[in-house]
Each structure stands twice: as C-alpha cells, then as structure tokens.
Image (cartoon, rainbow, N blue to C red):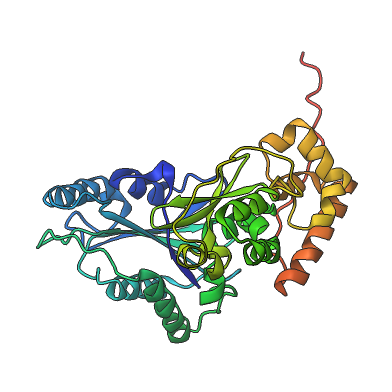
Amino acid sequence: MIAKKTSIKRARGTAALAKYIASAKEKGEKLDQFWLSNCNAGEGLEDLDIAIAEIRATQALNQRSKSDPNYHLVVSFANDEKPDTGVLKDIELEFAKALGLEAHQRVVGTHINTENFHMHIQFNLVHPETFRMHAPFRDFQILQSTAAMLEKKHGLQVVQGRGQDNERLNQKARDKEANSWEQSFSGYLREHKGTLLQINRRARSWEELHEGFALYGVELRKRGNGFVFRDIVTGTMEKASMVDRELSRKRLEEKYGPFEPNKKPGIRQTKDSYRRRPLDPRLERHPAWKRMTIGQPGKNLSWRRFLEQQAGVDAEAREALELQKSYLRIVTGQDPQKIRTRQIRPRKSKGMSR
C-alpha cells in the first residue's frame, strides 16, 4: 500500500475535487465504490451535490485561514489487490484518525481500470463544529506508519518503494516514469548524481559550481527556503536536496557562503542535457522510438501508450515492448504491471446498399 497526499490541477477547489473523485474522468478509469463520511447530507453518490454545499458552508465559517481547506489523499494497492468494502472503510477511518481528521467531513471513492486499484479521500480540514482549520503536521511520517500498520492488520501486500529513502524521490516523477516509461527530470538528475557531487566537491566558488552544473544543462536557483535544480531548456525543477543532502542549501552555503546567482545564465554548449528518452537507454536508438518521436504520434502519446497501441500490429513495437519489459524486470526485480495492447480487427464489409 502507498498513501500519499497529492493535488490535481484540474480538480482544485471543493466541488471540483469531489466531482473528480465521484466521476473518475480519466480515460479507461471507472468509479467502483463511493461514500461520504460525517456529512449530514447522506452517505451515497446521490447525496453528493448537497454534501458539497454542506462542506463549502462549513469552510466558509472559517475566515481566518487563507490556505486550501481540502486535503486530498490517494491510497494505492499492490497489483491485482482489491480489498473488500469493510476493509476499505476501515482504512479510510484509520487514516482519518492518524491525521487528526476523524470528525471531519470526507468524500471517498475507489477507482478501477487503472494500473492499480486505488482510493481517493477528500478531507475537509475545517472542523464541522469548531470551524477551526486542522493541518496535519509531518503527515509524511504519519501516512507511512499508518500504511505499514494497516498492511499488517488486514494482511495486505507491502508495495516496494514506500521506504523513507525511496520516498525522497519525487513522487510525481516516479508516477511519470511508471505511467509513461520515459525518464523524468528527477531521473535524469539521479543518473548524473555522481557527476553533480563531483562538481560540487571540486568547485571553490559559486561561479565554478554554476559553470559545472551548466555543462549538464541545469542551473541552481533559490526557491522558497531551499535550492532547486532547473532544466535550462524546459524550466522543469527538482529540489536539490532530493538528489543528495550534500546539495542542500544549508550544506552549500556552509561551503560557499551566502547564495550568489549564476552571472552567466542561459543555454550554452553542454556535455549532456535532459531530453525525452525511454527508461531503457538502449531503446533510444530503436526504430520504434525514432518512429514515435519523429512522427506525429509522439506529440500526444507516451512511450508506454505508443507501445500498447502498436504492439498488436507492428513487429518493431512488439520487440521494443519486450525489451522494455525485460529492462523493468531487471531494475525493479518484479514483473511489469499488466500491459494492455490494442488489437486491431479488420472491418466487416458493409456490402452494397440496395
């Protein structure tokens, strides 16, 4: 089980998020079960509109806090694992208790027909009686410990990659790689982690550090209370401390003094740079990859979706699919999740009209 707080840009706001959970608009994704908790409106899907009005009215009674009053939790289960309703409702309740949100209003839905069966929980952070906002503190640790407890309680499978060290990797980046089979910017930085650390260890000033990082198409910037790596071409960013703690703001300023921005920003000649590429680097030279990225399909399709669509009718795509699956087995130590390939059937002749 993996539990993570998340946000969806197209589902911001109380009503949008609740309707996203209830309708499951993603292609191939369907709502399985739905219920409401602590809502006077009722408990079922037919009560959703009234429940949304009730939740928004509760939130409106808190005028002090300006932060988002909604907390969106996604609980994903292992491949081919689908707990029954009683277990799912207990999981929802235990997470609510652990986060200090047991008495708060919640919208809950489970989605099927994606890579993993998963549950969405929308918490109203405003208490329905005191109207105080409750923002869970250190929720990462709470979610991990609660997930481990629930796995033991209900005999659920332990999902590989939930540990503290692995969770330091950008969750969105991991999702991107798992769903697209393409390298993320976070993955690119991990690939060059050793080189980036060597640049830092050899540099004697901020200027030398910036020059070294620029050779790999990235620049270091101050963002909030920390530092981020920014891809010079695409603008994609990742926390520097997520690559290694040695690259945190505290450690770097201890070595070089107060931060000094790059005095020579912009694109220059590089040794390597972040670009679109498959997770298996060997496949970047494969005819199927070249056909996808050079032609029109690559603009709208991920590598994984392209292979799923083409493997049923194209020998090169089938070969690339098997190579990619083999690579994933080696890297993860597990078989890839079930692949959906599209079967193209010949159209039946309509005959001549009379």
Residue 52 visible from this viewpoint? yes
Q: Is residue 64 left or right of residue 306?
A: left
Residue 342 visible from this viewpoint? no
Q: Is residue 107 left or right of residue 81?
A: left
Question: Image quadrant of residue 11?
Answer: top left
How many numbered callouts?
A: 0
Residue at x 71%, y 50% (from the top left corner): 304
Residue at x 74%, y 31% (from the top left corner): 296
Q: In this view, does 44 lie above or below 327?
A: above
In this view, the residue in front, 86 or 51, is: 51
Question: Image quadrant of residue 203?
Answer: bottom right
Question: Image quadrant of residue 134?
Answer: bottom left
Residue at x 74%, y 69% (from the top left corner): 331
- The quadrant of the rendering that contains the C terminus is top right
Residue at x 46%, y 54% (from the top left corner): 259
Q: In this view, does 145 lie above or below 181?
A: below
Whole-percent x, y for residue 194 in the image: 69, 66
Whole-percent x, y for residue 148 in the image: 46, 81
Whole-percent x, y for residue 198 in the image: 68, 65
**Among all residues in the image, which is located at the extreme top?**
354
Q: In this view, does 64 lie to the left or right of 18?
A: left
**Among all residues in the image, which is located at the extreme front?**
204
Whole-percent x, y for residue 290 in the image: 83, 41
In this view, the residue in front, 114 or 285, is: 285
